[in-house]
Amino acid sequence: GTAILLKDYRPSDYVIDKVDLDFLLDTQETVVTSKLTIRRAKGVATDAPLELDGDELKLVSIAINNSALARDDYTLNDDGLSITQLPDSDAFTLEIVTKINPTANKKLMGLYRTSGNFCTQCEAEGFRRITYYLDRPDILSVFTVRIEGDRDTVPLLLSNGNCTDKGELDNGRHFAVWHDPHPKPAYLFALFAGDLGVLKDSFTTRSGREVSLEIYVEHGKEPRAAYAMDSLIRSMKWDEEVYGCEYDLDIFMIVAVSDFNMGAMENKGLNIFNDKYVLADPETATDQDYANIEAIIAHEYFHNWTGNRITCRDWFQLCLKEGLTVYRDHSFSADERSAPVKRIAEVRGLRAHQFPEDAGPLAHPVRPQRYSEINNFYTSTVYEKGSEVVGMFKTIVGEDGYKRALDLYFERHDGDAATIEDFIKCFEDATGADLKQFALWYDQAGTPNLAIGTNYDEANKRFTVNITQSLRSTVVTGEVAPMHIPVRFGLVGPEGSDLSFSGVTGADVTGDVIHVREPKHTIQFEGVEQKPVISVLRGFSAPVTTIPERSDKELAFLARRDSDAFARWEALSSLAMRQLRQATKDVQQGEEISTSPELTTILHEILNDDTLEPAYRALCLNLPSEADIAREIGSDIDPDAIHTARTHILAAISQECLVSLEATYSKLQPAKPFVPDASSAGIRALRNTALGLIVRANGDLELVANHFANADNMTDRMDALSILALQAPYAEETASALEAFKKQYADNAIVTDKWFAIQAMMPGSNALERVEALSKAENFSWENPNRVRSLFGSFAIGNPTGFNRADGAGYRFLCDATGRLDEINPQVAARLITAMRSWRNLEKDRAGHAHEALKTLAAKKKLSRDVRDILERTLA
Ligand code: DPP
Ligand code: ZN
């Protein structure tokens, strides 16, 4: 396909100061009238054509300054409309009437139907599916929107900003007018029309603005929006207190819909959410669901400043709003919950999703330099690595410097469509820091690696640390430049406290941060009185891999004594990972699986250590997953051997700890009635983790079945169901629990998604047949993204043995499903097939089957640009 390049950016020849939209809603034929107040940019020739984007639109009429254009005054093409006959005056109005069919819109981009309602999604390029427009984020305009529809079927008529007028019309129709005073790009436009219930509250900003808060959900579900409302109010307060950002309209609305490509969308004043990130009650939502709702409500709300008030110049700058906003929502969750537990979960997520992306054929810089389909760049590199980069800024310039830089960013760029350069400049100007080298994090793809070796010179009390950075990337061509990597560290003495040093040479060390900038550093710490063990990358201060030369004994020491909770967990995971890799090798070589008593001893201590938070203990007891192990092994991966090895190790550890596990299970009791707060969630997590391990030790399925039957909340019910399904896929208890679950929640789509997902992840030789059957079940739908992801996504990502079945049937199945889905929803199809990006890392027979399946899909004639782009890069 044709790539769009960052270096080709140039400002538009025309700008749109004002937009007046009029929607005559109809399920099959909605008429959209768009009146644009256009201005020619300075210095642009009068014969420069006006090129408007458009996609799947029916043009009805077009007029300039109220006079209709002749057919040869403009040309229509596949991507839009080019107007060549324009007035000489620099300002003019353009009126365009189009017709669109919301019912036929299964891509869920533009205006579409969901559960009998009308809804829009415009980011990134959906507005061009509503009307012809300069659909690019640097065109900021003031929108006024009139919506007209049937009073009975669409009693609710919503758009951005404030409602300025509404009224009744003939023939059972009515209308509403919305005006948004804040100039915005078209991707932030939203419309919702339909019939929903509402939960209302209010918020008074610190300068005294009264904001009404409205969350729209299906009738009868209003009470299930209470946690989302609570999260919204806490977010608004937090953003004022921590970032000084205040809300700027009199109303903030959230609409929950069940057909949505993304998690949620930050449209100005009218967020639209995937309903799974709004609706929650103890009966239907797990603790993880509550945490997700809190995080996503915060994320979209925080976009009001980082995204909406300051938007992106072009889509290459996507991380400007996303990386920063993810960083902000992470900080919010860390403040509201347990910061170390939150950090560990973030790093697990980053390693599970972003690291493989960066190590494979879909790798791209945090700020890509080219794309052929922007929808494919809403990635964990842009979001999660983008957030890590913001965190590194803070590590480098300090808390105070960070605050000054952000204040400057808001002051300098409010109302702008900004760039990464603008953002970096604010840090430089506010703090005096030189961030030229650091800026490489935005432009150079791949995960850097740090090799670290140490030596203690007893006689001279000198501790030497050798650090070598390297970067292997599948996509960086030519020279790789060394990066600026902030490494938080401590020299841990024999008693567990950090040792001091009198001086240091060989690198810039400020406070507890080593600034790695060169390919190689030899760093000498003087005056170190005892032999330390170095703790590196505390708090995961940079998104890199490390190969510290450390013995099992040193890892065990850090796992017990490091003062940094993240580093403790990290040392423990590294120790466990060594074990699991060795065990995998043992399985492959047909040897007896060796286990290390040290790992078991530490896990046992953690299990019984009541001074540690339960949530932290639960994280420690959840050893690296099969996917984690596969990633660490990196090549010639045999998922069956990994599964066998991990199952064996977990059983061995559980048997050793059984008495303590049983004591933990019976002793821990979360508060009743159910509270969704972090500490209760932590207790449930530890208790249910213990339950899972008990079953690994003694196979007591009755205990789990009882836990399932007696659960008074979804976390306990779902955890029990997972233990049954994943550990005992063929058991009678599993079949009956699945059946009971299905019946109980048949009318709840969000919970039914969980039912699909858990079955998709069940291991065993008939995993694929089970998933195939589910894809033909009457409650399966190809048109609902959540349902599709819960079945195919969970299978491809969450079922390593079933999906990677040795005969390759899993790959063929996923490729077929992707091809079928592509005809309905290309964006979701493209995302699905990224699950095969690491196919080259598999052992050669599986890799061969995967390759064949991908090539067969790529040979299909009618593929979307979305899927074709992923396939081309995956196969390149
Ligand atoms: N709605 C997506 C998000 O908030 C894209 N902006 O990240
Ligand atoms: Zn976002």
Image (cartoon, rainbow, N blue to C red):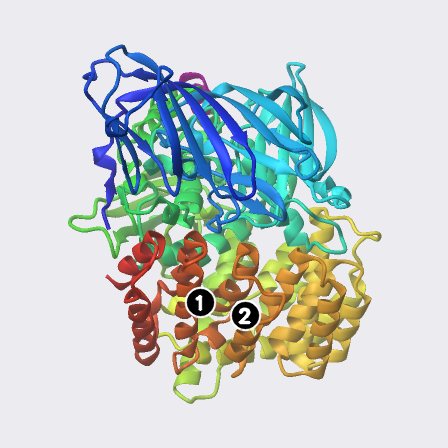
**Residue drawn at 54 percent across, 46 percent down:** 263
Describe the element under mark 1 as helix, strand or loop.
Answer: helix
Which residue is under mark 2?
Answer: 775
User: Which numbered disc flags the more N-terminal residue, 2 or 1?
Assistant: 2
Query: Residue 491 location, x and y as percent?
Result: 44, 48
**Residue drawn at 27 percent across, 16 percent down:** 41
**Residue drawn at 40 percent across, 39 percent down:** 57
Q: Nearer the viewer, residue 531 or 260?
A: 260
Whether 509 is drawn above or below 399: the answer is: below
Which residue is under mark 1?
Answer: 817
Q: Nearer the viewer, residue 164 or 172?
A: 172
Identify residue type, mark 1: Ala
Start and end of the magenta stretch?
404-412
Residue 407 colored in magenta in the image: yes
Query: Residue 515 location, x and y as percent?
Result: 34, 39
Query: Residue 472 location, x and y as percent?
Result: 26, 56
Q: Dot 2, crowdedness within 10 Å: few (<14), some or many (≥20)? A: some
Query: Is the shortest distance between ligand 1 and the CB of mark 2 under 8 Å?
Result: no
Q: Are marks 2 and 1 in contact (CB under 8 Å)?
A: yes
Q: Main secondary structure of the magenta part?
A: helix
Identify residue type, mark 2: Ser
